[in-house]
Image (cartoon, rainbow, N blue to C red):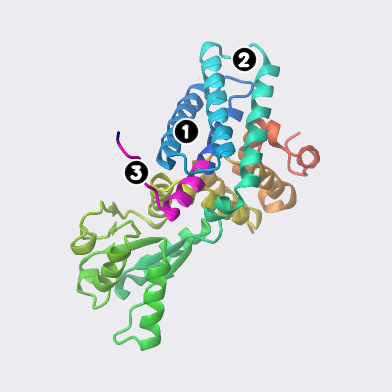
Amino acid sequence: MVKAMSVSRTARRKIKATLLHHTTLLTGYLVKLRGTSTGADDNIFHIKTEINTLLNLLSQLNGNYNEKTQENIKVIIVTGKRISRHRERTSILNSQQTFEDWIAEISSLKLELIQSNGKEIEYSAERAIRVFLSYSHIDNVLVGEIKKKLEVYGLEAFLAHEDIEPSKEWVEEIIRNLKECDVFIPFINENFKKSKWTDQESGIVFAKDAFVIPINIGLMPYGFIGKYQALPYENSSKTSKEIVEIMIKKNPLMMKRIQDDLINTFKGSEHYSESNYIVKLLEKIEPFTGAQVNELIRAFVDNIEVQGAWDAIEFIEGIVERYSGLVDPELLRKYKHAPFMPK
């Protein structure tokens, strides 16, 4: 008999947080199947992917989780399979009420999971994601532009400024930020290689086994970070988007944190062009939870700079349609009477 592999407390905590995150994603994809068949094939593919992910995560826990919570997640998985099989057989569900009952069952179970596992939820959204940008001071303009773009996503970006002889306090500040960062992004070229400090920063991060995304601005990764595939730099907008996409793909726990921070930025948008720009970012990180959906609609209702942005108008219209069952009725009424809504 093969003994089950033990899982550390920290690992269990991460798996539990990931379980709840993927449960939310699964529910979001199921809700998007409501009504029309538009995009149904893509949603069914995502549903099956999330189900397989949840089953894999449950197996990793080896039973080291609240029994009722595990049972609830299994019910959600079974119900998800039932809905996707039903939808594959017909473009429109034969019984819309049956579908609504299934969704209600899943939503109720998901709420119960969130209420009973608050600490695990907080793990994925307790603070901004910390990014350490490592570079030669010669390239400070290029890296500074990346920092600005990443901060739109709500990321907390630290630039490791390089002085000829940094003070002891400054060195300690750099080391502290290196130890606390979630993501380490070195901008690699000959300037980086000649720097007195960048290789030391890479060594510290290598020792803590952080999430590394090297950016090739003239040179491939080498030394401590030679094992990581580099992202070629093109321009600040494209590269920052690709950085975030890699973060979400490699570490799903970061997705909700990025979503929440980006939604907050959307709510505080100060110009139509900013609203339109943020919409393009939001479109890449669906699905959203019910709370996020209502915050997006509230941003439209409360902010005239969002109401007047054409891309934002189209985006919110789609959100209201796709997540109709999750929208607060009073908020929906306000949305329909917003000044810039097309009549």
- Name the kind of residue labelled 1 in the image: Glu
Eye-nearest disc, 1 or 3:
3
* Label 2 CA crowd tier, 10 Å (few <14, some 14–19, many 20+): some
* Label 3 – label 2 distance at C-alpha: 43 Å
| Mark positioned earlier in the residue sequence (1 or 3) | 3
323 is higher (above) or lower (below) than 293: above
Residue 50: numbered disc: 1
Compared across the picture, whether 169 is left or right of 301 comes to left
Residue 2: numbered disc: none
| Residue in view at x 48 percent, y 49 percent | 253
| Residue in view at x 66 percent, y 28 percent | 105
| Residue in view at x 27 percent, y 67 percent | 202
Where does label 3 land, which residue? 5
- The image position of residue 250, as x and y in percent, is 38, 47
What span is colored magenta in the figure?
A: 2-19
Q: Is residue 313 visible?
A: no
